[in-house]
Amino acid sequence: MVISGDGQVLFGYGNGPTLRWSKTGALEKLPNFDEQADIPRGASADGAVLASFFGLWIRGTGLVDCRCGPDCFSCQGIPTYLNHISSDALRVLGKTNEVPRVWNREEDSFRELPGSELARLSGDGRYAVGTQSNGSAIRWDWAANKVEVLWPGGAATLANNDASVVYGFGGVAGAELIRWSAASIEKLPGNWSNLAGCSASGDVLVGDLERVPSLLVRGRAAISIKAALEGANVTLPPGKVAWLGGVSHDGKVVAGLFEDTAGASSIFRAVLP
C-alpha cells in the first residue's frame, strides 16, 4: 500500500485490481497488466502517477508497461520491475536483468549500478539508497554516478526529500536502526523493522518497533500508531493496526492496514496530532 506525498491519495491491492482512493474523489479500480494483481511501490506527490511492480499508471494516460522494453525504461525487451518513484514522477528506480537502474523520464535515459541493491529514491529523485555487494550502506548520486558509503556493514532503506537524512540498518547482526546525516551517524534504540517511510525533513519515521507499527518523531520517544491516534481522541474499533504503508511529506498523515477482532481488515488513513 502506498500514500502520496501530500497525504491525499492512497493506492492498495488485494485479490483483485489495484485501487486508488482520493480524499476528494471516489474509489477507483485501476487496470492491471495482463489481468494480474500488481503491487504498488511508490507514487508521485500528488498521486497522479503510480509506480507498481510491473510498470506505471499515469492519470489521464493509463498504463505504461515497463516489462515491454522499447516504450519504457529503454530495456529492449528485458523484463523490468519497479521499486520506487520520485515525488515529481520524473525519476523511476527499478531493476533490469537483476541490475538496479534509475530511469530519467525527462530525458528518456537511464544509468545502472551493478553490484548493488537499491531500495528507494530520495523525494527529489537525485539519489538512490541501498547496499553494495560488500555490505556497505550507500547513497548513489546517479546523475553524477557517484557512490558514497554512509556506514559499513548494513543497508540503507529510506531517504528523505534530498537524501540529507537516510535510515537503514547496521551494527550488530545488521539489526540496529541507523539514522545518517552529514552531521552524524546515530544508532537509535529499539528493535525496528519494516520501515514504511519518513517525512520530507527526515524528522518523522514510521515502521515496526518490537513488531508494533510505530511513530518516531525526532527528539521524542517512539510511540505506537494506535496510541498516537488514541491520544488525539481518534475512536478506534476493537482490534489492531497490522502494518503501515507510509507517511506524508509533512509527517502528519499515515496510512496502513487495520484488523478488527473478527479478523476483517481494512485500509485506513489517519491524521496525526
Image (cartoon, rainbow, N blue to C red):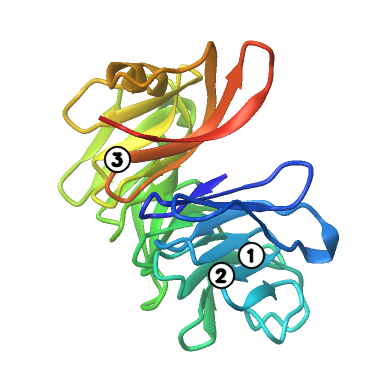
Of the residues tagged 1 and 3, which is closer to the observer? Answer: 3
Q: How far across and how far down the image is residue 92, in percent?
A: 52, 69
Q: How far across and how far down the image is residue 25, in percent?
A: 50, 56
- In the picture, which quadrant includes the N terminus? top right
**Label 2 CA crowd tier, 10 Å (few <14, some 14–19, many 20+):** many
Q: CA distance from mark 1 to mark 3?
A: 31 Å
Q: Is residue 154 visible?
A: no
Marks 2 and 3: in contact by CB < 8 Å? no
Q: Is residue 190 above or below residue 59?
A: above
Q: How far across and how far down the image is residue 209, in percent?
A: 43, 21
Q: CA distance from mark 2 to mark 1?
A: 6 Å
Q: Nearer the viewer, residue 230 or 146?
A: 230
Q: Secondary structure at mark 2?
A: strand
**Label 3 CA crowd tier, 10 Å (few <14, some 14–19, many 20+):** some
Give me the disc on residue 95: 1
Of the residues tagged 3 and 2, which is closer to the observer? Answer: 3
